[in-house]
Image (cartoon, rainbow, N blue to C red):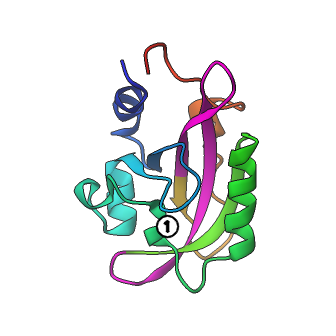
């Protein structure tokens, strides 16, 4: 079973948005390989619109450059990263998004994919519940044959 197929099996019923990308960190990458239905509801973009494009299309004027650079640095190591930043829906509306990104590496430790678990941060008390339990604290390794 491929990584995307394994994630799809898990992610289709989650309330958290899930995005799987390839491991290309330099523009025009990373390239989206999969988004789940919760991502479609949160952003307004369909899976067909996102697959093959960079998740950078969600960024805009209010997206922190420092947060984007910190995420890229973490993935280059590679290590998991957690941040909250401003993204933009397809309609142009800004929203705050809490993102947990887990690198997927091959046997040599090279980044081959990234899995992001995202949740909109609503105004009001509290913070989004951590989704670490969905993937474990260290992040996944690619399944054999991926």
Identify the image quadrant of the N terminus.
top left
Which residue has dot 1 on it?
A: 56
Q: Position of residue 77 (x, y in %)?
A: 76, 42
Q: Position of residue 56 (x, y in %)?
A: 49, 67
Give me the residue at 45% from left, 48% from top.
19
Residue 61 to residue 128: above or below? below
Chain part drawn in magenta: 90-117
- Asked whether residue 126 appears in the rendered view, the answer is no
Quarter of the image for residue 98 reads bottom right
Q: Is residue 5 magenta?
A: no
Q: Is residue 110 magenta?
A: yes
Give me the residue at 65% from left, 39% from top.
132
From the viewer's perspective, is 138 left or right of 86?
right
Q: Position of residue 75 (x, y in %)?
A: 68, 47
Q: Nearer the viewer, residue 26 or 132?
A: 26
From the viewer's perspective, is 82 left or right of 114?
right
Q: Nearer the viewer, residue 131 or 125?
A: 131
Q: Secondary structure at mark 1?
A: helix
Residue 63 to residue 45: above or below? below
Give me the residue at 44% from left, 60% from top.
54
From the viewer's perspective, is 131 left or right of 77?
left
Identify the image quadrant of the C terminus.
top left
Q: Nearer the viewer, residue 26 or 56?
A: 26
Please name the predominant secondary structure of the magenta segment in the image: strand
Q: Position of residue 112 (x, y in %)?
A: 55, 35
Give me the residue at 67% from left, 66% from top.
68
Disc 1 crowd rating (10 Å Cα; few below 14, some 14-19, many 20+) is: some
């Amino acid at each position: 079973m491929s990584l995307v197929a394994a994630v799809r099996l898990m992610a289709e019923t989650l309330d958290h948005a899930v995005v799987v990308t390839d491991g290309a960190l330099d523009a025009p990458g990373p390239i989206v390989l999969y988004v789940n239905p919760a991502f479609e509801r949160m952003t307004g973009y369909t899976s067909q619109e996102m697959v093959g494009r960079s998740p950078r299309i969600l960024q805009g004027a209010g997206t922190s450059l420092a947060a984007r650079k910190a995420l890229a640095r973490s993935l280059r190591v590679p290590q998991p990263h957690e941040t909250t930043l401003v993204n933009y829906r397809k309609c142009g509306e800004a929203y705050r998004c809490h993102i947990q990104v887990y690198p997927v590496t091959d046997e040599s430790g090279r980044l081959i994919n990234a899995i992001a678990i995202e949740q909109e941060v609503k105004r009001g008390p509290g913070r989004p519940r951590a989704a670490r339990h969905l993937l474990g604290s260290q992040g996944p390794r690619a399944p054999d044959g991926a």
